[in-house]
Image: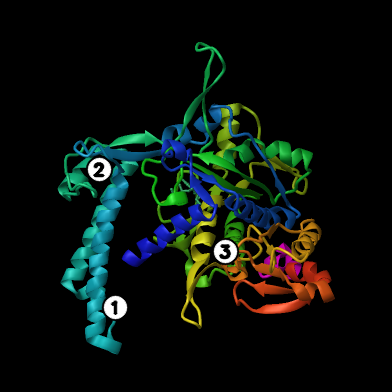
Amino acid sequence: MAKQEDLFKNVVSHAKEYGFIFPSSEIYDGLSAVYDYAQNGVELKKNIREYWWKAMVQMHENIVGLDAAILMHPTTWKASGHVDAFNDPLIDNKDSKKRYRADVLIEDYAEKLNLKAKKEIEKARERFGASFDEEQYKTTNPRVMEYLSKEREILERMGRSLGSGDLEDVKNLIEELEIADPETGSRNWTDVKQFNLMFGTKLGASAENAMDLYLRPETAQGIFVNFLNVQKTGRMKVPFGIAQTGKAFRNEIVARQFIFRMREFEQMEMQFFVKPGEEMKWYEYWKETRLNWHLSLGLGRQNYRFHDHEKLAHYANAAADIEFNFPFGFKELEGIHSRTDFDLKAHEQYSGKKLQYFDTETNSNYVPYVVETSVGLDRMFLAVFATSLQEETLEDGSTRTVLRLPSVLAPTKAAVLPLVKKDGLPEVAQKIIEDLKWDFNVAYDEKDAVGRRYRRQDALGTPFCITVDHQTLEDDTVTIRHRDSMAQDRVKISDLRQIINDEVSVRNWLMKM
Ligand code: ATP
C-alpha cells in the first residue's frame, strides 16, 4: 500500500516538475480539485482528445461531431433529472468540520469487512494448498460467512435507505456501525443531507431579471437537445451517433486523487441513436469497441476490466464501466450506458417539441433509443500518464526515469540536439527542425551534456532524440535514439520524417484496434 501511495505522489510531482499539470491559481495556494494543464500537459491532453475524435468521428461515417455551449436553458436540467436527482448524501463531522459522502463512509466500512474475509481466505489457501476450494470455504467457514453477510447486509440497507430517501436511516447506520471520521476518529456527526452537485450561476445583468442557470454537469444533454437539428441537417439515418468533447462541472463533495475527481473536468461523449429493441446489440458493440480503443494504446490488458452495474440509474436499462488500474486501484474510467428513450422523451415532454425520427422504410415515427459512451479526458490522461511513468535500472546500475507514453500521444515527437554548441551544428539542427515542424511537434535543446538532455527527453516522454554531430556536416546523417530501447541508429536526414511518422501516426496506432 505504501508503495502505491509513493507511486501516486511521484506521478503528481512529476506532472508538476515537467510542466504537465499545475494546481489552479497556485500563487493563491490553489483551488481545491481544480487543475491547470501546462505546456506539455496541454499537448498530451489534446492528443488524447484527437485520438478519441479520430476513432469515433473520422472513422465512422455515421457519427458526426458537435460543440454545444456549456450554458443551456435551465429547463434542460429539470428534464434530464439533474435538478431533482443529481445528489450525493453528505455528512459533516461536528468536531473536525470535515465533510464526507455518507455513502462512501459506509462503503469503506463494508470494504474493510470484505478485506477481512479475503485475508481469511488467503490464509486458508496457504494452509490447504492445491486442494483448496474457495467457493466451498466461503460458504462454510463461519467467520468468513459472517464478514461477507455483514458486508452484504450493510450495503443492501444503505441502498434501500438511499433509494427511498430515508436519510435518517443512513445516519443511524453510520452510528450503529460506529464509523468515525477517518482523519480524526471523532464520531460526532451531523444529520445526513442531500447535496446537489450542479454549480449554479446567473444570466443577465440586473438582479430582478437574472435567470438561474447551471454549468453543465455532463456534455450529453447538449447532444440530446440538438438531436433533431443534427439528424435533419446532416440527413442522418438511424443508427447514427453524435460525438462531443468539452468541459463539465460538478461540485464534488470530496474531491481527492488529483485529476481523477475534479470539479471542472472534460468529457468525451458519444450518443448513439438506435431503433428501439436494437439497443442491447449496440450496447454490446460499443462495450467491445471502446475496450479495443483503450487496448490499442498498449497499456496492458491486465489494467482494464468491466464492471457491470447492478443498480441502474433512473434512465438506464443496462450500464457498465470500463475500470482502469489507477495507482490507487481499479476505478471507473469510462461508462457505457444504454439510456433507453428516457432523455429524448423527457425533452419532448418539457419542451413540447417532437424529438422523433421518421423511418422512411416503415413510414412511421419513433423516439430512438440511445447507447452512450462517456469517458473522462482527465481520467484518460491520468491512466496514460501514471502507467507510463517508470523508474528503470540500467545495465550499469544507474537508474533513469522514463515516461513511456504511447508515442502517438507524446507531447513532443522528437528533440533535435546539436552535440556541441558550435562548429555550425546548432544551425544544422535548426534546419532539421524547420522541416520537421510542418508535421510534428519538435523541440530543440542545446543545454548540458547530451546524456543529460536524453534523460530530460525520456522524462518528458519524447519518443525520439535526433543528434547532430560532426559527421552530419560530412554526410547528412544523424543519430536517432529511441526512448524505450535507448538504441541509436545512424540515418539520413532525409529519412527522418518517414521514420518518425511510422512510429507516431494515428493510422498505425488505430489499426491495432
Ligand atoms: P464517479 O462514479 O467516479 O463519480 P460517474 O459515474 O458519476 O463517475 P459519469 O457521470 O458516468 O461518471 O461520467 C462519465 C465519465 O466522466 C466518467 O467515467 C469519468 O471518466 C468522468 N468523470 C465523472 N466525474 C468526474 C470528475 N469529477 N472528475 C473527472 N472526471 C470525471
Overall secondary structure of the magenta section: helix
Q: CA distance from mark 3 to mark 2?
A: 52 Å
Image position, residue 290 (x, y; %): 59, 60
**Going 71% across and 63% down the picture, which residue do you hit?**
506
- Mark 2 belongs to which amino acid? Val
Magenta stretch? 501-513
- Mark 3 belongs to which amino acid? Arg
Counting residues from the N terminus, which is met first, the one under dot 3 or under dot 2?
A: 2
Query: Which type of secondary structure does the marked residue at label 1 adopt?
Result: helix
The residue identified by callout 1 is 134
Left of 444 or right of it: where is 155?
A: left
Q: Nearer the viewer, residue 117 or 81?
A: 117
Task: Characterize the local packing of mark 2: few (<14), some (14-19) or many (20 or more) Cα atoms within 10 angstroms.
Answer: many
417 to 173, vertically: above or below? below
Callouts 1 and 3 close, C-beta under 8 Å:
no
Left of 404 or right of it: where is 306?
A: left
Task: Characterize the local packing of mark 3: few (<14), some (14-19) or many (20 or more) Cα atoms within 10 angstroms.
Answer: some
Image position, residue 311 (x, y; %): 40, 52
Image position, residue 140 (x, y; %): 20, 75
Q: Is residue 156 visible?
A: no
Q: Quadrant of residue 479?
A: bottom right
Query: Which type of secondary structure does the marked residue at label 3 adopt?
Result: helix
- Residue 456's tag is 3
- Residue 171's tag is none
- Residue 170's tag is 2
In which quadrant will I find the N terminus?
Answer: bottom left
**Going 79% across and 63% down the picture, which residue do you hit?**
432
Q: Is residue 502 magenta?
A: yes
